[in-house]
Image: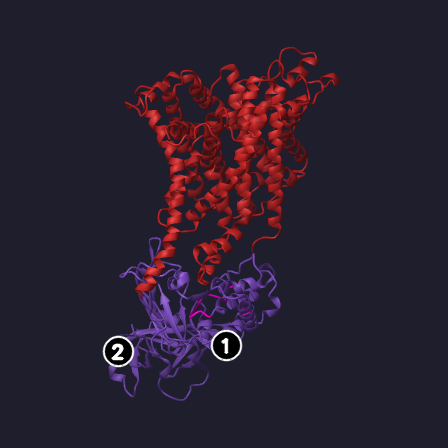
Amino acid sequence: MTAAAASSAGPVSAQKIAGYGIAAIAAVLVLYPVFYLFQAAFDTGDPQTRPPTAYGFDNFSNLFQYPQILLNTLTVSFAATAMALVIGFVMAWTLARTNVPGRRIFEQMMTVPYYLTPLLGALAWSMLGSPESGFINQVWRALGASGHIIDINTPYGIAWVMALFEGSVAFVMIAAVMKSMDPSLEEASQIMGASRLRTMLRITLPLVIPGVLGAAIFVFAEMLGSFAVALVLGTPNRYYVITTAIYQLIQQYPPRIQVSAAMGVSLFAVMFVMLFIYRRIVTGGSYATITGKAFRPRVADVKALRWVLFGICVLYLLVAVLLPVLTLMFASVQKIAVAFPAVDNFTLSNFRAAMSMNAARSALGNSLILGFATATIGIVLMGMLAWLIYRSRLPGAGWIEYIVMFPQAVPRLVFAFGMMWAWLVFPIPIYGTLWLLLIAYLTVFLPLGVRTIAGVMLQIDKSLEECAQMCGASWIFRTRTITVPLLMPGLIAAWLLLFIASVRELGASILLMGPHSKVITPSIVESWFGTASELTATLALIQTLVVAAAVIVMVLVTRRLAAEPLN
Amino acid sequence: MPNQPHIEVENLEVFYGTVMAVRGVSFNVLPGEQLTLLGPSGCGKTTTLRAVAGLEQPAAGEIRIGGQLVFSSARNVNVPAEKRGLSMVFQSYAIWPHMTVFENVAYGLRVRRASASEIAEKVHRALDMVQMRDFADRRASQLSGGQQQRVALARAFVFQPSVLLFDEPLSNLDAKLRADMRIELRELQHRLGITSLYVTHDLEEALAMSDRIVVMRDGLVEQTGTPDEIYSLPRSAFVADFIGSANLIRGRARPDLAGGGLIALETADKQVIYGTAYGRPVGAELTFSVRTVHLQISLQRPAGEKNVWRMRVEKTVFQGDFSQVHLAWGNQRLVARCAAMEPIAPGREVFMTVEPQKVVLLGE
């Protein structure tokens, strides 16, 4: 029996060593930069020397020198959150609960703004709505008016573009709440004799409010940490929110590392608290609506109003998707971007320039390499983490989950700042290389990858793995023959999501890329500030095409896998 | 040692989170025997089975399989599930959806690095035994529940494990199929002569299939015995009630009336009922258990003197093969199960009688 005990020690510890090894890698990836971020934030010594010579809270009290930034951030975030919630709620109610024509197609189209990225929206809306050269204002003046009708370079312009894209996130969250509501709750109210309006006010609204509140907090946290739109639309007017201010303070000469670190830590703290509250609302609610069980919601016949709602849906997709994409396409084939087409203004030279420009080509190439590498390494790392957290039952799995989900609460720009500071002092010189970007992507996309894979993993009956174990298969053998094949749909979806996320990453890349490791999204921003908007539009279009191709593959793959469900 | 138990479980304790799901369970399974863990949901039977399998790590106790220690908290031994030489049929069948029926069954042999010819031969023989040979190339999604069940079974015994574990294998089948599979499983188990540990909450299944039954409740063993012992001589009120419906009659002992192998009990209504102790100690306060099928109702006074009472019918519930008659006996309510008959009008007085041998003293 001692022999059996001794032989048993081998495979169990192999599993444990692999598990804790992977967990340690994740912990280092996440906590090492966070440590340096905090170190810089509390460093009150000489900014030129590292490690710090003195610690204190001075950097945080210095933040009060920037009241305008706080005000700007709150203005933009509140305005954008309010608009995004209105968009999300109206669209969710319309598509989940009314008989608006074309519901199915609209529902599928609602994810498109998410894939278009706020940066693309900001570039397009800048071309559409800047006070002088914006297409809309050009048309306005051509109609005989003077001045401008819209100005996108204002706080509300920034909020508008942010809301257009975050609106689809709010939609997904609120629609999920509406769909998970048991329609018999409303039917019971009507059976008791309550009118439709009374049912709506007394039953439906109170039941969806926690979900909407959760969405509001989540969206607000995202707005606080959003970067691209404020960068493109705000910086030209020296209108800074907290993320663009952090970026500015790091980029200027001399950089003000300590104050920006303190800003980053403060932002992180606020977002952390908000996401904590969000989790509490979502998981702790005693509301029976949030059970995760999907019902077929009751669809109300809204009669003539359905055409009004139809118009609203079309309008939203028009301003969030069609108009931006058309604007970029239109601008990309013009010599000088103007509202009115002219034959002698038409050119294909922008595409030629984009493809022949060394910087752009290498940036696109680097992004594709990074996308492939991040996605491929990512699914292995994140697949093992998901298995470790949700399946292995190793002690400490709960803590690993917290660490892995940590980057969710930190804006990527702030995370990248910690990373820059951390890897600068790292003995192996990876700063300024693609390796650093790879490490950064693997870190900031941990929550995305782990959640995607875990979603599929949790649907697989645990007994399928246990049965292999009972058949005598070792951990490695059953992982290879059972777990991985069953997880394939999740792994493929995760691969594509990671690839897409990498190719369009901005916040982390813009701080971490070096002159010889440029990637596409920050290059688009550089091009916007440095060269012509027509060329920028071309670059943005090319990036969108790459992402669109990946999205189409993903939709096809997931649809094929959904057609033959895994039991 | 031919009579050494094949599976020995001693003082097993298992925590599920902070809840103690199994609170000190001991039993043995003899070679070739089918032992069933029976109890309501949440009694710890499945947790016990999974601990034997090695899928759950117990907090305390010892488990031996074939004389070999596979778990001991004191000696810090915990052989992983895949090294215990067991096999298991899961409640959900756990048929791998990405493999054919053949590949599912062949898995355990592939793990053991059997040759291709050996795999083909053994898999086909196993599929023959469960009448699934024609389905070898099908995928799991193309099988019905009963067929999946058979594949799971073939997969479990094809590599000749020393012990088969069954975790409520029939609970997902419809009633008719379940009755058929019960007989089939029992025959297969006899043919293979394999030691089996079976878990179910279904009484009929346990009575029909087991050599011995362990009745569990709240993480403890309530009674161990053959199906007949469990049914005829329940040890506690819980077992009496769980194993088929029973009437419980409480009262104080009347040793003065005892004799002739019988003991007597007087209820609070001063009614006397004679029963049998079956060697259990007779205290001052007694509880008798009488199965509902053993109470006999007649309209005329039956012959005999002991255990004959007049009672009032409260209601009769028609249940197909039998009728359930609710009777008022002073303050006590009794239920009798009679073969289907003309309904008796509520309020009518009838005679009720029961053989004293069928009135069992509970050992509490």
Q: Which residues are magenta?
A: B160-177
* Mark 1 → mark 2, Cα distance in angstroms: 39 Å
Q: Residues within 10 Å of mark 2 (few under 14, many from 20)?
A: few
Picture coordinates of residue A154, whole percent (x, y): 53, 18
Q: Which mark is residue B187?
A: 1
Disc ID at residue B320: none
Which residue occupies 63% across, 17% down? A134
Q: Amino acid at mark 2?
A: Pro
> Which residue is painted at 36% across and 18% down in the image?
A64
When the figure is inspected, residue A401 is found, relative to residue A318, above or below; the finding is below
Instruction: State the quadrant of the C terminus of chain B.
Output: bottom left
Determine whether the residue tagged by mark 2 lies in a helix, strand or loop: loop
| Dot 1 amino acid type | Glu
Tell me, yes or no, whether the two marked residues, 1 and 2, touch with CB atoms within 8 Å. Answer: no
Judging from the image, what secondary structure is the residue with disc 1 in?
helix
Q: Tell me, yes or no, whether the highlighted magenta stretch contains residue B77.
A: no
Chain B shown in which color? Answer: purple
Residue B278, quarter of the rendered image: bottom left
Residue nearest the viewer, comparing B80 with A318: B80
